[in-house]
Amino acid sequence: MNVPSSPAGARTAAPERVVRHRLTDRFYHWIMAVSVLTLSVTAFLPIVGIKFDWVTIHWIAGVVLSAAVVFHIVRALAAQDWRAMAVGPKALAEGVAELEALAAGAPPPRAAKYPIAQRLYHLAIAVLVLITMASGGLMLAKIDTPLWRRDPYFLADQDWGWVYLAHGYAAMAILSLILVHIYFGLRPDKWWITRSMIRGWITRREYLDHHDPARWSPER
């Protein structure tokens, strides 16, 4: 399968700098990245024997992450086209076409704004983060903070076991996805995507090489 050539109209219509991520979305992404890394460090370092006062840092990072995720959900539903990240039959068919092209040694078909791999990753991380948010929110009842007093009997012991189980397994899965994300973000062939999350835009050449102008018309 060959990548279709870019129409002349698309070349002239696309600006030199194609906006891929607005400043608000980039700010959210890096807030979430710092929060998740802080949560991972404070959760797993004590397990390997590095002792420090991690509880306060952990729950504050969790609250920051939760606030950022709620903001992102509201913004996506109210001010963005959330369907651009949806994973449906059409998106899955695109994934099959990409795998077929890869198996045949041909260039993959150009995607809309977000390729199927990004959509699947977004879906997986969204589900796992929501699980950790819900379970972590319940676990806040077991610690004292300036805003509330602890109530360890908020749930029965058996129910707390399920909460800890969900939180732990989701956290380990998130850590694995973070490593995958960092790996692909640092790959030379994917650096143009990482760079767009820093400066907000991609070049016209990158846009025409990787995106189908008929499926994603960039803003000027």
Image (cartoon, grey):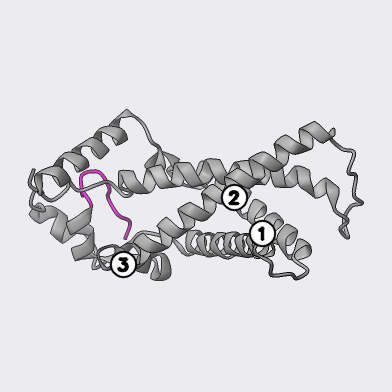
Say which element carries label 1: helix
Q: Which residue is mark 2?
A: 171
Instruction: Determine if the magenta segment contains residue 214.
Output: yes
* Residue 5: x %, y % from top left: 7, 52
The residue nearer to you, when weighing 197 against 101, is 101
Amino acid under disc 1: Ala
Left or right side of 136 for 27: left
Q: Quadrant of residue 94?
A: top left
Q: Which residues are magenta?
A: 211-220
Labels 1 and 2 touching (C-beta < 8 A):
yes
Sequence-wise, which precedes: disc 2 or disc 3? 2
Mark linked to residue 191: 3
Q: What residue is shown at x 88% (from left), y 60% (from top)?
A: 146
Q: What residue is shown at x 21% (from left), y 49% (from top)?
A: 213
Say which element carries label 3: helix
Q: CA distance from mark 2 to mark 3?
A: 26 Å
* Residue 111: x %, y % from top left: 24, 47
Give the quarter of the figure containing the C terminus.
Answer: bottom left
Q: Which residue is mark 1?
A: 43
Amino acid under disc 2: Ala
Amino acid under disc 3: Trp
* Residue 177: x %, y % from top left: 46, 52
Say which element carries label 2: helix
Q: Quadrant of residue 89?
A: top left
